[in-house]
């Protein structure tokens, strides 16, 4: 037995008539359903976290993740520890959103540069985080004879991400790199 939309609405009663008279309501329901589907399919909540594996979801980040995975900072830091500010929760999530939307834009429009370079703003964030984590060592350098006019990675190039070009497997593979226990 097939029930038409009008028959169904008459069975629902007065509330059903209200929905037919207000087409905005079904539109809102459809938008919420579409957003919920997007969140579930893309695992969007993962992007609010700090797991480095999430940063490597974009294939243009494969070599960076691969070098990080084999680098000295892997046991101690995630990507967010170095690449995002930590002075306040607001600045952290604002920058996370800004960088994320930039990445979505360049990837979606096909304008991803062949070689990814840090912008001045990101360099300042990373430099501050280096100094914050390695304050004792940096203090020793700053009072020494060497001028403190360079970024940390100009001398310590292979420290954060490991040696460039050393990877035999230039992509992330969850079989090769399963999440650590407790993450």
Image: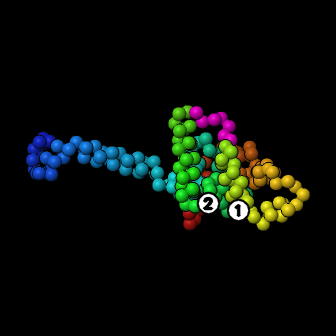
- Report the front residue among 72 and 25: 25
In the visual, does 163 lie left or right of 12? right
Residue at horizontal 56 percent and vertical 37 percent from the top: 106
Residue 127: say if magenta: no
Image x and y of residue 46, in percent: 50, 55
In the visual, does 10 lie left or right of 60? left
Colouring scheme applied when the structure was drawn = rainbow
Element assignment for label 1: helix
Residue at horizontal 66 percent and vertical 55 percent from the top: 82
Residue 117: say if magenta: yes
Residue span colored magenta: 111-118
Residue at horizontal 74 percent and vertical 45 percent from the top: 164
For mark 1, does the 10 Å Cα neighbourhood hold few (<14), some (14 to 19), or many (20 or more) residues? Answer: few
Residue position marked by numbered label 2 in the rendering:
86
Q: Which mark is residue 132?
A: 1
Quadrant (top left/top right/bottom left/bottom right) for the C terminus: bottom right
Query: In this orientation, does residue 174 appear?
Result: no
Residue at horizontal 74 percent and vertical 63 percent from the top: 134
Distance between mark 2 and mark 1 Cα atoms: 10 Å
Image x and y of residue 34, in percent: 35, 45
Q: Is the C-beta separation of discs 2 and 1 under 8 Å?
A: yes
Q: Which mark is residue 3?
A: none
Which label's residue is closer to the chain start, 2 or 1?
2
């Amino acid at each position: 037995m097939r029930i038409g939309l009008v028959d169904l609405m008459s069975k629902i009663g007065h509330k059903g008539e209200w929905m037919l008279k207000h087409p905005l309501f079904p539109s809102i329901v459809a938008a919420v359903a579409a957003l919920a589907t997007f969140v579930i399919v893309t695992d969007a909540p993962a992007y609010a976290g700090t797991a480095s594996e999430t940063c490597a979801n974009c294939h243009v980040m494969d070599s960076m993740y691969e070098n990080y995975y084999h680098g000295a900072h892997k046991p101690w830091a995630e990507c967010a520890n170095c690449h995002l500010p930590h002075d306040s929760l607001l600045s952290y999530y604002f920058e996370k959103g800004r960088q994320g939307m930039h990445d979505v834009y360049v990837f979606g429009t096909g304008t991803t540069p062949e070689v990814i370079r840090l912008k001045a703003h990101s360099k300042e964030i990373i430099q501050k985080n280096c100094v914050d984590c390695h304050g004792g060592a940096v203090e020793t350098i700053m009072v020494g004879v060497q001028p403190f006019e360079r970024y940390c990675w100009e001398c310590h190039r292979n420290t954060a991400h490991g040696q460039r070009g050393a990877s035999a497997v230039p992509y992330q593979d969850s079989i090769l790199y399963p999440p650590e226990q407790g993450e």
